[in-house]
Amino acid sequence: MDKNTIIGFVLIAAVLIGFGYWSRPSKTEIAEQQKAAEEQAAQQQAEETAKQEAKQETQTNIITDSTALFFAHQSGTARDITLSNDKVAVTLSTKGGTVSQAEILGYKNQEGGNVMLLSSEDSRLALSLAAKTENIDLSQLYFDTEEHTDSTATLLLRAQNQGTLRICYKLRPGSYMLDMTIKAEDLSNFFTPNLRKISLDWQDKAKQQEKGYTFENRYSTLTYQLTDGSTKKLSETKDADKTLDKSADWIAFKNQFFSAIIIAHQDFSNVTLGSKPLEKGSGYLKEYHAQMEALFDPSGKDSTVMQMYLGPNDFHILHSANKLSASGKDLNLHELVYFGWPLFRWINRYFIIYLFDFLRSFGMSMGLVLLLLTLIVKAIVYPATRKSYLSSARMRVLKPEIDKLNLKYPKKEDAMKKQQEMMQLYNQYGVSPMGGCLPMLIQMPVWIALFNFVPNAIELRGQSFLWVSDLSTYDTLISWHRQIWLLGDHISFFSLLFALTNVVNSWISMRQQQNAAMSTEQEQQMKMMKWMMYLMPIFFFFIFNDYSAGLCYYYFLSGLISILTMWGLRKFTNDDKLYAQLKAYKAKHEGDPKKVSGMAARLEAMQKLAEENQRKQRGKR
């Protein structure tokens, strides 16, 4: 760098420094600038503070936090309020404002006390409201008691703006129905207009009420009715979860003989259900869970109307409870008493139940009622039983004729031709091989209908007969403390008697079949079926060992009456006279045009087809 360049840089620096010194503000100007900056900062701070205050004021007007909205009810002491009549005692808790306990009066548990359907230890019903930004969990708030009588109670929450939320309860006199009405007043500002919902979270561990866990568990299930009137249920035997794609009228936590049902008269939506079986010996059957939403109007124009049925699964009581519907909606609560598939349900509902009630009206013990019920049912089906027996008897007296055909066609290749001639023989004597089966099939719907009726008859609960202390559960001949596979921890005497009568009936049936007219092939098939017929009663014993004594008693009586009926028919049926009647029938119709039964016609067609195929095969050779 040369001398001239250095001098140039020095001059430029001197000019810049001089200009800066000359143009700097004075002390007065600096003070004014600082003052202006401070005023600007103060103004910005004031504006920010005003914004914050405005925001806080706005939030005050749209409070959504439960602590702020119902601040005065955030803490307190939970108290129990009891509503009762001569049927049920319901306990409400001021913490959460819902039912915490339900005691069914007049029905005893295994310990001798009243049945406790719901308890504060095992059940929980929590309500929550969907506000603008958060949910208000009512289960954590302490309600005031505004009004309380023996059958009514009103629980109250007051908001900071003096708005209110009331839950009103009314226990119907002489009924198991509890009305529940939720009504808001002046709370519209706290809720979004298009989000008018109250959420319910209901949980319960269903307590084992009866002696037999297995049998009671089989009839305990979470049941619900959709708004289209159809009744559904979750699995009784395994874990089950279901989200409904339709709205529901009611949801029931059902035991074998008692149910807690919650009913929404503006429908339950967004319903999610769950059921989980609990282990034997735990004292519980299942763990139920239901989450759903119902209508809620924060303006108070419309109230949320719900009901709870807390009582027995008695068909007549449940049916009459439909008249107590708060909205006139057809509840169909009697569908909780399961009477089987449509045909069997029809038989039970329009015949068996009326006959049962008629016999019960005489004040007899339930053992005698079941005895008379069995006798009447057997009398009704007796014509079919007699027709079935006579059909077998006709087959029996024709055995000599069939033996001739067996000798005539000893080869297997002639089996179809032999079968065809047997059909012709039956036609000649007016005998139908199916005549013994069809009348028996007519009896099966009644037999199956009673299989569904007896276990659901709460009238048998706690009723003693002979050595049985409770006809609704199994009786005990011998018991032990360890579980044995298939057998359990006891032997039921009535189940054993039922199995023995089945063995005798099987023996009688096999003897009739052995003496009946059959081809050689049919006789071989009967020998194979023989052991199956004897094994079935043993199989039934293991199944019915856990079933109710009343059901096993009915089947024992039914089997015993069948044995006596078969003995009487056999004793008073003269085979020679019956054979003479068959020959007279043959002689009378011998000149008639040949009539071929449908079975015989098909066999004849098959025989012709087989012969044609044989001729073709011989022609090819």
Image (tube, helix red, strand yellow):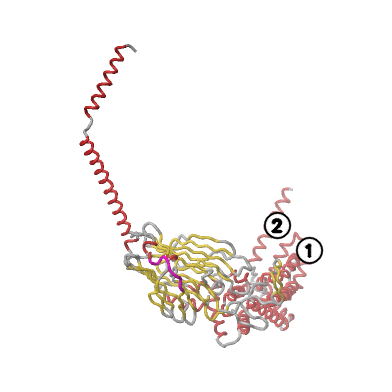
How crowded is the residue under tag 2: few (<14 C-alpha within 10 Å), some, or many (20+)? few
Query: Could you say where residue 31 lies in the image, as x and y percent from the top left?
Result: 23, 38
Query: Could you say where residue 558 lies in the image, as x and y percent from the top left?
Result: 66, 78
Majority secondary structure in the magenta region = loop
Q: Residue 76 colored magenta?
A: yes
Q: Residue at x 31, y 52 (%)?
A: 52
**Residue annotated with mark 1:** 410
Q: Residue at x 61, y 68 (%)?
A: 282
Task: Assign a secondary structure to mark 1.
Answer: loop
Query: Residue 599, labelled with which disc?
Result: none
How crowded is the residue under tag 1: few (<14 C-alpha within 10 Å), some, or many (20+)? few
**Residue annotated with mark 2:** 611
Magenta part of the protein: which range? 72-79
> What's under tag 2, amino acid-wise?
Glu
Q: If you read the primary sequence from the N terminus, does the residue marked by circle 2 or circle 1 appear first?
A: 1
Query: Could you say where residue 477 lies in the image, as x and y percent from the top left?
Result: 71, 77
Left or right placement of residue 287 versus residue 596 in this view: left
